[in-house]
Each structure stands twice: as C-alpha cells, then as structure tokens.
Amino acid sequence: MQMMEKIFRAPILNPIDANTWRFYQDGALGVDQGLIVHMGDFTAMLGQIGADMEVENLDGVIVPGFVDSHLHWVQHRVTGRFSGELLTWLQEHIWPEEARYVDTDLAQAAATQFYADVLRAGTVMGMSYSSPHAEATQIALTAMRGDWVIGNVLMAIHAPHTLTDYSLHDPDALRAFMCQTDKTHYALTPRFAPNLTAASLKTLGQIAAESQCLIQTHLAESVTELQWVKELFPDAAHYTEVYDRAGLLTPRTILGHCIEMRDEEWRCLRERGSWVAHCPTSNEALGNRRMPLEQVRAYDIPFALASDIGGGPSHSMLHVMQRFLGTHREADVAVAPQEALYRSTKAGAECMGRGAVGGDLTVGKRADFVLLPQKPAADSVEAWFEECLSGKSADLEQRPLGTWLRGERAA
Ligand SMILES: [Zn+2]
C-alpha cells in the first residue's frame, strides 16, 4: 500500500456513471499530499493502518465535492433577487450589476464572499463567467478557492457602454490579456451571439483554436432570444449554426441551456462533441421552458448540471439536483438520483477537462469532498440521497456538514 498521512472513516458514496454509484457503509478515504491514495471498505485496509497514521471518524456520508458547470460569479450578490423574461432581466437588472465590477474593491469583497459561500454549499469546482473587466477577472482568478475556469464576458454591441467599453473583444487586447492569465483556468467567454458580430465571433473561434482553451457561451435559452438571433443573423440556418460557422463548437465548448433547439442543432452538437450545461433552476426562475432531456439522451449529448446564478435562485448544487429530478419527473421523464449526483460531480469535471484530477473519489484524484448528514432511518441509499435534496434552497445551501479541499477542511 502507498504511504498515506491520514484516513477519513465514514460511509462513502461515489458516482460511477449516469446510472450507477457505489456505496461503502464503513468506508475509508486515505489521503496523502492532498491526493486520494486509498478508497474502499475500512475493514479491508485494517491490517495496513500503521500506528503513526491518523484516522479521523466523520459523522456523515462522504461524497465528492460538487462541480457547477455554469454560473456568473459577478451575479452572486443579486442571486434570486430578480426574475422575468431573459432579455429584460439582463438589461434592467443584471447588466447594471455587472457594470459595478469596474470597482476593484467591490470585486475583491464579492470574490471572497462568493468562494466562501459556494464552498459552504459543497461546490469545489466550476465554470464561471466574470464581468467584461480584466481586473475583476484577475481578482476572481487570484482569490480562487477550489478549481475554477473563469472568463471575462466578451460583448461588443447591443449592451450599455458601461460594459462594452471594458470588453476585451479587440483581438490584440484579448490575446495580450490571455497571455497574462493561467491558461488552465481561463475560458474564452463570448456572452452570447447577440452581443457580437459574425466577424468578431469568427475571430474568437480562431483565438480558441490557437490557444486550445475552453470556450463557454449561452445557446437557445429563450424564445425571445431565439427571435433576436434570427433577426441579427438572417442567413444562418439556426442559432447553433451562428457559433458553428465561427468555429466555436468543439469538445472544449460548454453551452449554457440549449432549450429551443431543432433536431439538426442537436445533430450538430453531437458531431462537434460540445457539452451542454443544464440549468434547471435558472430555467424555472426565468420562466423558460424545460430543457428537452429526452432529446439530449437520444442524441447522446454530454451534459453536466449548473446553478447559473444569478438566473438560478441559489448556488446550492443540492438544490439544482432537487429541481433536475423534479422538473423532468413532472414531465414524466424518468430520472434517478444516481444521475443527479453524477451530473453534479464527475460529468462536470469531465466537461472542464479535469476528469483525471477531480469529480469523484478515485485513487489518484484530489481529495476534494463534502460531508452530507447521515439519515440512519432511510431504508435505501436512494431514499437517503433524495432526503438530502429535500427542502428549501436556503436550507440546502447550509446542508453540507463540511467541505474539504485536498484533504484539508475548507468550509
Ligand atoms: Zn448564464
């Protein structure tokens, strides 16, 4: 057996795939230098525990830390405060808030609060949209706790100058900024098609190809947005084609929402290998339709779950899992708790290109985990897990008993 500094002893639930998880009633998680060096039944490793090894008994159930594949950290302060039709909501509430991140003191305080809150709720990784400001984006990168990929939103047109004036949509300025940032934590982030021209989207596609960085944007979230895109790009067959012609659809691309989609658009995503970030709570809050999970499954599109704060009413991934199960079941589409956990952990890490280092509790990965309260009365693991997802979002934000990053208590 490999050397290890510490063993956490508790029941462990580890996601395998969309249909399967593995539960260890008396589990052991061995950690050395922040990495998992053992995971399995405690009794199986009893004989190998040295006298100098520390064993910490945890009163709860260990699950991997959560991954949020799409959120706007610069909307955290107004999460849940506004709702309404997507475009009006952006123009009246969200863009004025994002414009405030020109103030670096405000950005610094907000970043510290954001990371503290998401860790408290069990989120250890994710894909994050920043405001257009280079400084605010750098602040979020520097203040980072956990493993995040962040991009300054790129928006040149059809938005207030308080945002477009600061957007690095000029290719030279953008390339220069990207050179200063850690490539592994940076995503090229065109906000959405209406904020850029076909020519500038194409330039971004070239920059993405040169740098091989992750790409994140929004696609087909609402009916009014779809109509606007049709007017702005009249010669595109559909919304998906606007991005595809620009070379922005790759296996490193994560597309928020994907609701108002035609069959040929799903086929296109399938061919490009792009990911969907599915945001059920945001879609409900802004009155958008349900993402057609049946289509996503039929076309075998990879997807991960996301809170999409501030469109989503809470940064809790437990709340996102609750509504993922709820919204699709209400439409008579079968979804299992195993899938909810998998889409909030392992699938999220994979969409970020982090499948080898995070997302579940496999030996060799980072010891990033969450402790959920044990419910001894539950007669099955499924029933226990669904119990963990029940309640109001404010309660779910506080439900984890603790969050660990690289084997160290972080919240
Ligand atoms: Zn979003």
Image (cartoon, rainbow, N blue to C red):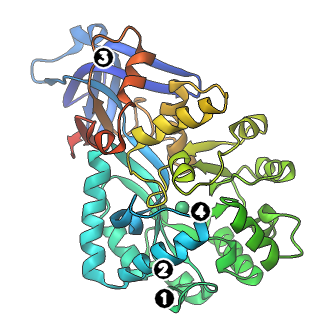
Disc 1 and disc 2: Cα gap in Å? 6 Å
Name the residue that disc number 4 marks: 216
- Distance between mark 2 and mark 4 Cα atoms: 14 Å
* Distance between the alpha carbons at the discs numbered 3 and 4: 37 Å
Q: How many marks?
A: 4
Q: Nearer the viewer, mark 2 or mark 3?
A: 2
Q: Residues within 10 Å of mark 1 (few under 14, many from 20)?
A: some
For ligand 1, the image quadrant comes to bottom right
Q: Determine the residue positioned at 24% across, 71% down.
A: 109
* Residue indicated by mark 1: 166
The residue identified by callout 3 is 27
**Amino acid type, label 1:** Tyr
User: Residue 7 versus residue 219: which sits nearer the camera?
Assistant: 219
Name the residue located 36 percent from the left edge and 46 percent from the top edge: 123
Amino acid type of disc 4?
A: Gln
Q: Residues within 10 Å of mark 3 (few under 14, many from 20)?
A: many
